[in-house]
Every structure is written in structure tokens, then in C-alpha cells.
Image (cartoon, rainbow, N blue to C red):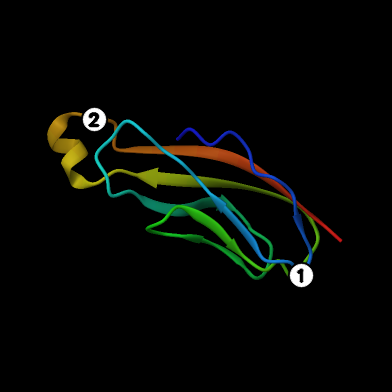
Amino acid sequence: MVTGGLPAGRLGSRYREELQAVGAAQPYTWTLANGKLPRGMRIHRRKGLVIGTPKEAGTFNFSVRVEASSVARYLGQPQAFTRKFRLKIKE
């Protein structure tokens, strides 16, 4: 995964940030591995987006797991990676 960090969001305002990964066979599957996102937000499984309209302010710590397609296993590439993120939602 190459995304280093996430920009802050604003309470009640639409948020959309794309996560990026390189180095293994696509398509990727993205999931929330640990922690929590603000209410009203989610990880888009196929597009790798952190999206939604946050319904609570604060600082949220979570991990995202990206998993490569089954072709990666066949090619001997890494199949999954997890990265920690911190997202601040301002009032």
C-alpha cells in the first residue's frame, strides 16, 4: 500500500479519499481490518475509497487491509498488506 496518510475531514461534509496500492495483481479487495471509522463513513471494497459523510467529530485510528487477486498467489507476489491510518474529523 502506498497511501501514507489521510487529510482531515469536516463533520457533516462529504469525504472521499482514494487509497492506493501497487506491486501485485489487481483487482484488489479493501477492508477495514481494525479500529473504527466515524459513523457515516466506510471503506469501498473494490475501489479502495474512504468515503461518506462523517456524523461524529474526533480522531479515528484504524487499519485497512488490501488483498490482491488470486493471480498474485500464482505469480508468487505478496497477497495482502495492512496499514494503520489516523483520520481527524473537525467540527
In-image side of 72 versus 64 (left or right): left
Q: CA distance from mark 2 to mark 1?
A: 40 Å
> Against 72, is 58 above or below?
below
The residue indicated by pointer 2 is: 77
The residue indicated by pointer 1 is: 12
At mark 1, the secondary structure is loop
- Residue 77 location, quadrant: top left
Residue 73: image x %, image y %? 18, 37
> Against 8, is 76 above or below?
above
Tell me what residue is drawn at x 27 percent, y 45 percent: 26
Residue 72: image x %, image y %? 21, 37
Tell me what residue is drawn at x 65 percent, y 70 percent: 40
Question: Where's the C terminus, which quadrant?
Answer: bottom right
- Residue 56 location, quadrant: bottom right
In-image side of 15 versus 24 (left or right): right
> Residue furthest toward the left?
74
Density class for disc 2 (Cα within 10 Å; few <14, some 14-19, many ≥20) is: some
Which kind of residue does numbered mark 1 sit on? Gly
Residue 87: image x %, image y %? 70, 48
Tell me what residue is drawn at x 18 percent, y 29 percent: 76
Which kind of residue does numbered mark 2 sit on? Gln
